[in-house]
Image (cartoon, rainbow, N blue to C red):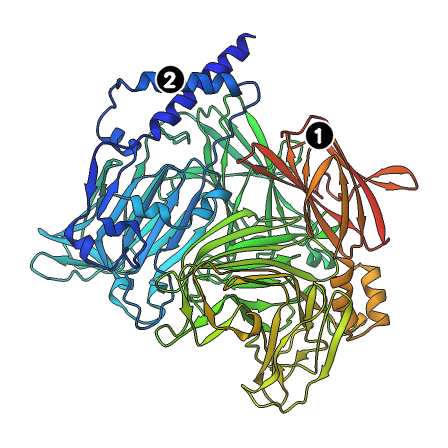
Amino acid sequence: MLLLMIACLCLFELLVRHLEGSLPCPRTVCLPVRFRRSIPVVMHENLVLRKAVLVDSMRSCRSDERRRPRMHDAPLRWIALFVLGCFVSTWTPAIAEEFTFSCWFNGWRKNANDPSADVFAIETNRYAMILDVADFDRFRLGWIENSVSYEQAVQHKTEKFLQLPDAELLIEMEVDGVQYVARTCEAGLQSGVKHLSSVRLWESGRFVQHYDFLDLHFRSEAGRILKCDARMDLVAWPDSLTLNLIVSGAMDCNRCEMRLGVDSRVGKWQETTAFEGPLRDGQEKQLSVTCCMQDSPISRPNADSAEVSVSVVGGKALPVRFDRLKNCYVATAEDLRRRRGPASRELREYDEFEITVAGADGSVPLLIDLRPPASVVGVCPVLCDEAGRPNGLPVQLSKNWHYAPMGSYVMTYTILPPADEPTTYRLKMVYGFYGTLPAASHAQLCLIGYGGNGRWDQLAIGSWGETICFDMDMSLVNVAVTDIRTLMMRDGEKGKKWGWTNAGWGGDWLNLSDTRQAKYFPNGLKTAYLSHGPCLTDVRHEGYYGQDREVEFTARVQTLRTDDYCRTFMNLVYEFERDLDVEKVWLFKLGRTFTYQTPRLDYGNAEGIIRSLDVPVDVPKGELFLKSTELTGDAPHWVSFTGASEAGAKRSKPNGYRSLIVRRYHAEINGRDYEKPTIRCPSYGSEPTNLDLELLPPGGMRRFRKGDRIELDLELITLPRVADDYYGPNESFRDHLEASPSSWKTTYREVNRNDLRVTVDGGRLRQRYPVVVDVEQSTVSMEINGGVGAVPIQFRGIPNSEGFELHEVVDGRRVTLDQSVHGMDFWQVDFDSATNTYRVTFNLPLDRTATSRWVFETRATPSQ
C-alpha cells in the first residue's frame, strides 16, 4: 500500500508538471526584420511564420528565470488530483523516449528557379534548431514540447521548426590581432544542383544526427578573407548539441585564437582556445562546445561517475573513452579475429559484445565503432540482456564502405538505462543469418567517399549484396528508388554463391511536373528508423512534394527475414494540399534501368493472368509499348517483367527480374473513389527493348483538388528465372522454379498464396500481410490460410520483453517454434513507448501446408 501511495504521488506530480508546462509563456518573440523579409523559412502562404510572432514555450521562459508560483496553479493541482484519482488504478505512464530527427526544411535537391533558402534543421524530443547555410546569422534554437513517441513525432513533419526563437551562432578566429567571423560555408556560396553535398551526412537515426559543414568562410569586418581549411562538425543527441570547429592544413600566422559558442533562449555556451602558428600541412586544431539542455536525464562524465566497459564475448576488452567531439562514451572495435574458411562467406556467425554499466544516475549514451565489420553490406545490431535474450532497447545503425581513410565501418549508437549496480548487456551484430534464416536489415548508409552526401537508405536480406536502395534526399539522382537486386542467386548450377546480384535499376515514388516546376522534389523530409531488423524492418518517411508543399506524403518501407526471394513492402500516401493541374504524373515507377532487356510483360489480378505480351527487341526509346491500361478484376493486381535479364553489361552479375504487386490501390479524387490501378509501359531502351512501368492516377487524370488522397500498398519482388540460378535452402520455391521456369506463375504464386486469410481468437487482426495482431489475452490462437516464404507475424501489446512462446498446432499437439542457431536468435523485440508495451516479431515457415494453426502465449496479462 505504501508503494502504491508513493507511485500515486509521483504520478500526481508528473501530471501537474505536464499541465503547467503546457501553459503559454506570457512573453512573445518578434521576428527581426531580416527574417520577415527573407525567404528562408516562410515559403508558402499557410506557414504560421507569416504572422511574425512566435509564442515561446514555458521551458524557454525557465531558461531565463526561475518560474515563480502563480495563483492559478492551485486549481490546476485540484484538477490534476481529480484526474489522477479517476485514472490511477489503470494508467501507467509511458517510458520517456529519446529521439532526434534531421532534415532540409526546403529540400536538398531543387529546381533551378526555386529561390528558397537552404535551411538545415534538427529536432529532438526536447529542442530544435534551424540554420540557413548561406547566412549563419539566420540561426534559431529553442525548446519544443514533444510529448509524443518517436513514431508519432515523425508524423508532425516540420511544424515544430516554426515555433523557434532567434539565437546567435558564434564562429570566430582571431589571427595575429585581426578578428574573422564565419557566417557561411561552401554550400551557402554555391548554386549548382548538388551544392549541398558539401554539408555531409555522417550518421543519422533515432539517437544521433552527425553532419559536417565544409569550407567555412571567415571574413573580417574590413572584408578581408582568411585563407584556411576549416569545417564545423555537428553532433545532436536528444539532450545536447555539440559543435566542433576544426582547422586543418597550412595556415600562415603567429598566433590564432578560436572562439565557438551559442547564445539562445535555451542557454549560453562559449569555448575559446589558442595556438601558436604557423599551422603546417597535416596538422589540425580543434575547439568543441557542447550545449547541454536543462534537466537532462542522460549521464555525462561531469554529472556522475558512470563506469562503462565493453568487451568482445570470449575475447579482449575494448578501450572505452568519453569522446567530447561526439558527446558520448565510445568503444572502438578494430580488426576483430573471426573464423575463416569456405563457410565464413555465408556469414552465419555474429560479432558479440558484452557491455557493463555501473554507477550511472542517468541514462548512458554509447557508441560502438566497429571497423571493419564482418560484412558491411548487411548488418543488424540486436541489443540483448546478459543471457542473450533480445530486450527491445533500440540501437541506431549507420555505416559506410565508401570512405577510404576509415575503411568499412559500422557506427551503432544507443542509450542505456541508469544503473547503480553493475548491469550487463549483450550486443549481437547479425550478418548473413539470424538463426536459420537470412536476416533483414535497413540502414542509413553514409555516402561520404562516393558522392552526394545526403540521406541514403540501404536494405539487405542476408549480407551478400543490397536488396534495394532509396536516395531519400535525391543527392545523387533525381528519383527515390535506385539499386534493386535479388537474393541467393548465381549464374547456373556451377555459378559463384554469396555475392552481389542484379535485378534492374531505378524507380520513383510520386512524380509531378508542370511549367513552373520541372519536378516536384521532396522537402521537409523526416525519417524515423523504428526497426532496423532482423526479422522485419520498419522505417517511416514524412514530408512534402513541391516547393510550395502542394502534396503531403507518408511512406513506410519494410523488408523481411526469409530464404527464398526479396520482398520490399511500401505503403505510400499522397494528400493534396492545393489544387493542381500538372503536365506529367506517375504515382510509382519502376525503371530507368540500363543494360537490361524485357522479353515479356505479364499483368493480372487476384484470379490469375489478364494478359501476356511478347516484347519486340526494337521498340524505340520513349515509345509507349503498353498504353494506359486499367487493371480489371479484384486486388491484388500485379505486373511482371517476366524473364528480364542483363544485356550488354561489361561485367554482368547473376541477375533476375522484377515484379510489382499492388495489394491495395485507393484514390479519392474529385469526390470519387477508385480501387483499380492504371498502368503504362514506355520503352527506356531499344535493341534490346527495356521497359519501364508507371503506375498512374485513374483515367490518366492530371487535375487534382485540395483534399484529394491516394494510398498504395505495394510489394516489389525480385525473382530468378530458373531453378539452377537459385541456391537457397527453400525446397518449395526450388520445386516451383523447376516446374515453371521464367513464368508469370512465380509472381502469381506470391500474389495468391500471400493474400492471407487469418482468423484470430484472443486478439485483434490489424493487418493481413505482413501479419500484425493486437494481443488482448494471454493466449492468442490463429488460423492462417496460405503463405509462401518466411511470413512475418508481429504481436503487439506485449507487457514484457520476455515470457512468451509461439507454438504451431500439428496433429492436435503444440510444437514450439524454434529457429535458433546460437540461442534465442530467431525473434525480434521492439519497444513501443506510445503504449509502454513491446512488439514481438517472428517469421513463420508457411510453405509446407495450405492451412496452419498457431498459438501465442504470454505469462502476464497484456496491457490494454
Query: In the picture, which quadrant includes the N terminus?
Result: top right
Identify the residue at the far right of this view: 811
The mark lying in front, picked from 1 and 2, is: 2
Q: Which mark is residue 229?
A: none
Expressed as whole percent of the image width and height from the top left, the position of residue 355 reads 55, 34
Q: Tell me if I can see residue 726 in this picture.
A: no
Badge 2 is on which residue?
A: 77
Bin the neighbour count of mark 2 within 10 Å (Cα to Cα): few under 14, some 14-19, many 20 and up. Answer: some
440 with respect to 368 (left or right): right
Q: Earlier in the sequence, mark 1 or mark 2?
A: 2
Q: Secondary structure at mark 2?
A: helix
Residue type at numbered disc 1? Gly
Observer-nearest residue: 144 or 821? 144
Could you say whether the residue bearing mark 1 is in a helix, strand or loop? loop
Whole-percent x, y for residue 765 in the image: 70, 43
- Rendering coords of residue 542 (x, y %): 47, 54
209 left or right of 249 in image: right
Amino acid found under the numbered disc labelled 2:
Arg
Q: In x, y percent, where is residue 468?
A: 59, 63
Q: Residue at x 22, y 27 (%)?
A: 65
Q: Is residue 546 visible?
A: yes
Location of mark 1 (residue): 803
Assess disc 1: are there few (<14), some (14-19) or many (≥20) residues with their C-alpha within 10 Å of its C-alpha.
few
Q: Decide: is 264 above or below 611.
A: above
Quadrant where the C terminus is found in the figure: top right
Quadrant of res 110: bottom left
> Could you say which is closer to the camera, residue 429 or residue 158?
158
Eyeballing the image, is 132 above or below 476?
above
Q: Is residue 739 left or right of residue 301?
A: right
Q: Tell me which residue sits at (68%, 31%) in the image.
A: 802
